[in-house]
Amino acid sequence: MPDLRPDQTKTLSEGLSSIQGQAERLLGKTSGDIIASQVAELLHELAALRLLVDLPQDGDRRRDLREPRRDISIFRIDGKDVDCAIEDLSIGGAYIIADWPVKPDTEIELNIPEAGNVAARVVSSTENGVHVQFDNISDPQLIAIANSMRAHYTK
């Protein structure tokens, strides 16, 4: 696959997601077994292509596949609950948006809808949010996040 800039990768992934949604609607209206089988095969190929597009590329700081999302959530810091939005999620961490200053190496507990409260450490911050890395994530939490990512790509 040719090297793509992050903005090109995001646009390509969003376009593939749109096509995937159209194919799913078509599958719901299809009555013939042969056509339904062909549309299902197309959906499988689209999901695989989206995964390839979204995988971290050489030179990326990220090591894990990320699921873009916009979940309203909270994180706990020093006994205080802070409203936030989870912008993307991987099995290793997340990017969250919050109106609360958090410095690198700060320990927080992030509530992930499908996985519950996960211990995390802030690895970097931007003007808008923070990147966190999960610490001591349990197997059930890891499985819940992996299942969410699989559902995102295979719909």
Image: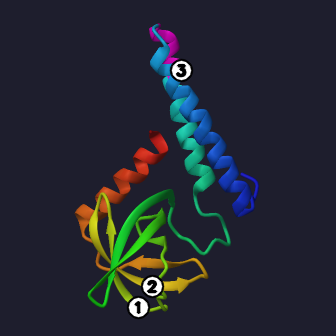
Q: Nearer the viewer, residue 13 or 65?
A: 13
Badge 3 amino acid: Leu
The residue under label 3 is 26
Dot 2, crowdedness within 10 Å: few (<14), some or many (≥20)? many
Whole-Å distance between the Cαs marked 2 and 3? 43 Å
Residue 79 % position (x, y) = 26, 87
Question: Magenta includes 81?
Answer: no
Which residue is depicted at the point 35% across and 72% down?
A: 74
Residue 155, above or below 40: below
Whole-Å distance between the Cαs marked 1 and 2? 5 Å
Dot 1, crowdedness within 10 Å: few (<14), some or many (≥20)? some
Rendered-image quadrant of the C terminus: top left
Magenta range is 32-39
Indicate the secondary structure of the residue bearing disc 2. strand
- Which tag, 1 or 2, sits closer to the chain's start? 1
* Predominant secondary structure, magenta span: helix
